[in-house]
Image (cartoon, grey):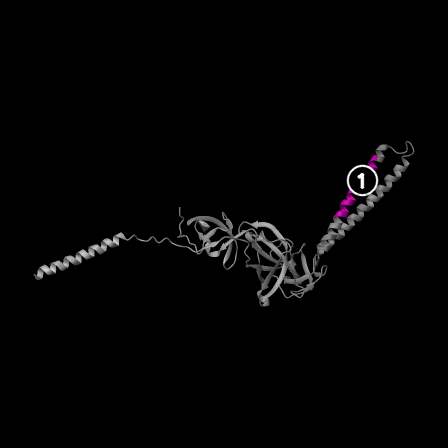
Amino acid sequence: MKYFGLIFITCLVITACSENKAEEKKIPLASSAPSYQTATVQKGSVSSTVRLPAQLAAYQEVSIFPKVNGYVKTVSVDIGSKVSKGDLLMMLEAPELLQAAMQAKEKYARSKADFSLDKERYNRLLEAAKTEGAISPLDLSTVRSKMEADSAVCNAEKTNWQMQETMLGYLRVTAPFNGIITERNIHPGALVNAAAKDKPMLELKQLDHLRLQADIPEGLSAGLKDKDTVCFYVSALQGKKLTGTINRKSNNINPAYRSERMEIDVPNKEGVLSAGMYVDLVLYPKGSANVLSVPKSAVVTSTEGKYVLKMTDKKIKKVNVSTGNSSVDKTEVYGDLQTGDMVIVNANDEIKETK
């Protein structure tokens, strides 16, 4: 009887477990479809701030080399000297040039005298030729030809003399514009060679007026125009904010860096700034009023490019886009989107399209 009762109880337990499993199989499993946070595509540009490196350069600068061979006689300036246009910077001496100029002057005087004599002789023969038979036409023609030849020689000698005088003028080295001497590599007594271009005698820069040169990425350069105001900071002035206007655009995109060179004129009457200073240029791109914007996290960047995930009737569609200005939380997008479309926020490349 004991064994019979034990077998009976065991059968009851097995039957109860079987019924429970059957009941579990009858309950359908709930399908857990993923839910995503979405945002609306909005119309309007995104204000942003872009910082770019730039550099200050002299408004004008020139490396002064010798035009003629000679010896340095005197040097009137040194590094840091302020000069005005036309000021004497240095004197060279070349005795051979002086002799050549004197010889050219003498030749010109001689040819001029010959031409004057031939001209007077021709005028007298021409006057005598008015009497019929007094002068033969051949003699008159010969004297005239000689006069014209001497006139050509006289003009050539005059040109040669003027050229020699010009060469003598190169012995006086003067400043081509107002500026400051920033480099000096010559001293009195040195021999200078017009063919040597390895190192200039002097370096002159105009520093009371500077150029701020910046290479603007092509995505930003299209939105900048002449006379637009920009601000910049110079680390040497402890972050002091300075402003300027765009004065020149190159209108040429550098194919190597995809950027456009722009220049901003910077007054420097007090001489606080120096050429070569590093500048932090700050731009505030305006963008377009008709552009569309989405949350920054909605744009996915992958090896396939940039895209957003658009939600339509609970279906996900990938839309390729290009981006424009960006702020902390928004970015401008260009693609097959309309105002009011829903896109997934915090999107990533693991979210797949649905059909």
Q: Quadrant of the N terminus?
A: bottom left
| Residue 297 percent location from the top left of the image | 46, 56
Along the line of sight, the residue nearer the viewer: 105 or 280: 280
Q: Residue at x 25, y 54 (%)?
A: 24
The secondary structure making up most of the magenta span is helix
Q: Taking the image as drawn, is residue 219 in sight?
A: yes
Furthest-top residue in this view? 133
Along the line of sight, the residue nearer the viewer: 242 or 270: 242
| Residue 22 percent location from the top left of the image | 23, 53
| Residue 114 percent location from the top left of the image | 82, 44
Furthest-left residue in this view? 1
Residue stretch rendered in magenta on the structure: 141-159
Q: Taking the image as drawn, is residue 201 in sight?
A: no
Q: Residue at x 83, y 37 (%)?
A: 144
In this rendering, the answer to whether 18 lies above or below 76 is above
Q: Residue at x 85, y 43 (%)?
A: 117
| Residue 350 percent location from the top left of the image | 39, 52
Q: Which residue is mark 1?
A: 148
| Left or right of 243 on screen, residue 125 | right
Secondary structure at numbered mark 1? helix
In this rendering, the answer to whether 254 lies above or below 278 is above
Along the line of sight, the residue nearer the viewer: 299 or 244: 299
In this rendering, the answer to whether 119 lies above or below 326 is above
Is residue 300 inside the magenta stretch? no
Q: What's under tag 1, amino acid-wise?
A: Glu
| Left or right of 63 on screen, residue 134 | right
